Amino acid sequence: MDHARRPLIAGNWKMNGLAADAEARGRDLAGRTRAGDAPPCDWLVCPPATAIPVVVAAVAGAPVAVGGQDCHAAASGAHTGDIAARMLADAGCGYVIVGHSERRADHGEDDAAIAAKAAAAHAAGLVAIVCVGETEAERDAGRAHAVVARQIAGSIPAGATAANTVVAYEPVWAIGTGRTPTVDDVQAMHAHIRGCVPPSIDAAALRILYGGSVKPGNAAALLRLPDVDGALVGGASLVVDDFWAIGEATR
Ligand code: PEP
């Protein structure tokens, strides 16, 4: 971790819990950040869409941002069931995750679709967290760096900057499995990503998160890597003690 880039600890709550659970989790996290001696990181939580308003209210006044888990590329229109980026902004979000591997797999989203979503996020004033990552077969075939370079080239829209974009490297095979790449592999991939982002992005200022089975027990080893600027956390972000412990690992 390079402390010139303030680490971001982001929780992706996925499709878990009801509004009351999310509100309680948000309130607990906000209370900890207000209690003094909080770790030197930015906090973000991405609740299910229906819980965004209660979480925004629960963290009001605390240094905890709220984000969406996806957005549509269009600003409005006949897209039943979708959410526009500006609706997320209107609800109090500052961020949106785009291109999570579960969206790529479950909804057939390709790089071009993800770039369009990230562009919509930027137009709405949101920071887009653009997810990339190889499958296990791609890593085993020695293609991980090439796959991620292709995803970076295709998923980051024109005009993206280090201020409106965060990249999350999430190897598909590490998500929810308890498995992680070696720290050497993580550092090598993050340095690779920093080297291949488009020229509109100041690569030295870009925050690149690692995601995939981050837990309190492995967070320090991952977060101390020079090109790891935080974590995108799934399962462990649902338990505030664990999420907080991951943030503590940024000290
Ligand atoms: C994720 O889905 O973004 C993720 C990183 O999940 P987990 O931490 O549960 O592996």
Image (cartoon, grey):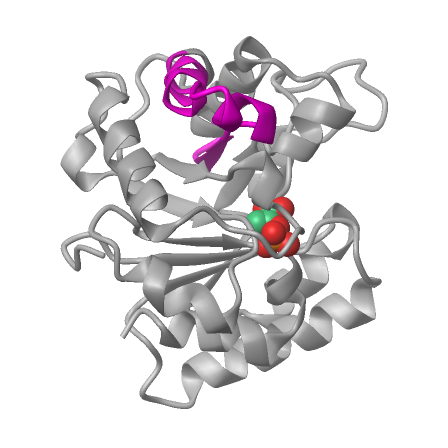
How far across and how far down the image is residue 224, in percent? 26, 62
Q: Quadrant of residue 173?
A: top right
Image point (66%, 17%), residue name: 109
Q: Give the left or right position of residue 154, taking residue 74 as reference.
A: left
How far across and how far down the image is residue 102, in percent? 69, 34
Quadrant assignment for the N terminus: bottom left
Can see residue 159? yes
Image point (39%, 46%), residue name: 209
Q: Quadrant of residue 172?
A: top right
How far across and how far down the image is residue 106, in percent? 77, 26
Q: Is residue 141 magenta?
A: yes
Q: Where 135 falls versus 233 (above or below)? A: above
Q: Quadrant of residue 190?
A: top left
* Numbered-mark total: 0
**Viewer-closest of 155 and 211:** 211
Image point (52%, 77%), residue name: 30
Q: Give the left or right position of residue 32, taking residue 201 as reference.
A: right
Q: Where 215 falls versus 135 (above or below)? A: below
- Magenta region: 124-153
Image point (42%, 22%), residue name: 148
